[in-house]
Image (spheres, rainbow, N blue to C red):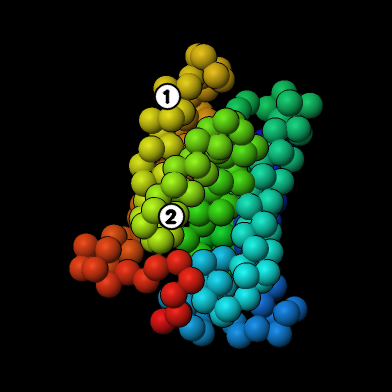
């Protein structure tokens, strides 16, 4: 019956990922639905375009926490019941996919950067720190949130492999989830990559 628990954990992770904090926070604070302006993306960067830094910060925190909580639950129950690390890895992907394809928003969600960082915090905090510092450095120097996310995504698998064996144990299932998250993030940023190449990408805080 352990497979039922495993499927339940993966399903719970997807459900948590489907909580659209950009829409929830905006509605509570009386702001416009982030799907109706800017990039139309229900994420923290687009919420910032509403002019409310507080709403953007709360959205970022909510999206990050749901990624961490989903993985922490999977880790705790998997360890307690002796489930393989693959369950944790799939739960990590499920919460990310919940954010990107939430059933609560007709399967049209955000890019998933904050949720991915939340996932990494739960999987390997030092790996999350390395990716977060990469994002901050690029975003601060270029003011392009998308470029920062793209470079952090590209480097995440390399960071994991470099740290495996010294900073954390090598786990093939977790490595698979990190690579999959990286590829999914790059896929979600296809339009941003195109706009960056054309010089048409919006900068952080810029209203469209």
Q: Residues within 10 Å of mark 1 (few under 14, many from 20)?
A: some
Relative height, residue 61 to residue 72 (above, below): below
Contact, mark 1 vs mark 2 (Cβ under 8 Å): no
Label 2 crowd bin: few (<14), some (14–19), many (20+), radius 10 Å: some
Q: Which residue is mark 2?
A: 139
Q: Residue at x 45, y 80 (%)?
A: 207
Q: x, y (%) of residue 162?
A: 42, 22
Residue 161's mark?
Answer: 1
Q: Residue at x 62, y 39 (%)?
A: 121
Q: Secondary structure at mark 1?
A: helix
> What x and y, as percent, mark residue 40?
47, 77
Q: Position of residue 143 (x, y in %)?
A: 41, 61
Residue 166 appears left or right of 159: right
Residue 46 on image: x %, y %: 51, 72
Q: Tell me: 140 left or right of 123.
A: left
Question: Residue 208, which numbered label?
Answer: none
Q: Nearer the viewer, residue 154 or 77?
A: 154
In the drawing, does residue 37 fall left or right of residue 196?
right
Task: Compare marks 1 and 2 and give the one earlier in the sequence.
Answer: 2
Q: Secondary structure at mark 2?
A: helix
Compute the Cα span from label 1 to label 2.
Answer: 24 Å
């Amino acid at each position: 019956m352990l497979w039922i628990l495993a499927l339940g954990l993966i399903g719970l992770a997807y459900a948590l990922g489907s909580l659209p904090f950009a829409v929830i926070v905006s509605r509570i604070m009386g702001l416009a639905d982030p799907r109706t302006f800017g990039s139309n993306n229900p994420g923290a960067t687009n919420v910032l375009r509403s002019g409310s830094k507080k709403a953007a910060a709360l959205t970022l925190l909510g999206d990050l926490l749901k990624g961490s909580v989903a993985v922490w639950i999977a880790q705790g129950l998997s360890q307690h019941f002796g489930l393989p690390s693959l369950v944790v890895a799939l739960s990590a992907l499920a919460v990310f996919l919940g954010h990107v394809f939430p059933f609560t928003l007709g399967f049209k969600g955000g890019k998933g950067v904050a949720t991915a960082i939340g996932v990494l915090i739960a999987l390997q905090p030092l790996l999350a720190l390395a990716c977060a510092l990469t994002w901050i450095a690029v975003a601060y120097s270029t003011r392009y949130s998308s470029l920062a996310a793209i470079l952090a995504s590209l480097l995440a698998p390399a960071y994991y492999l470099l740290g495996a064996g010294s900073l954390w144990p090598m786990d093939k299932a977790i490595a698979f989830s990190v690579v999959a998250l990286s590829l999914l993030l790059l896929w979600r940023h296809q339009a941003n990559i195109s706009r960056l190449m054309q010089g048409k990408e919006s900068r952080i805080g810029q209203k469209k």
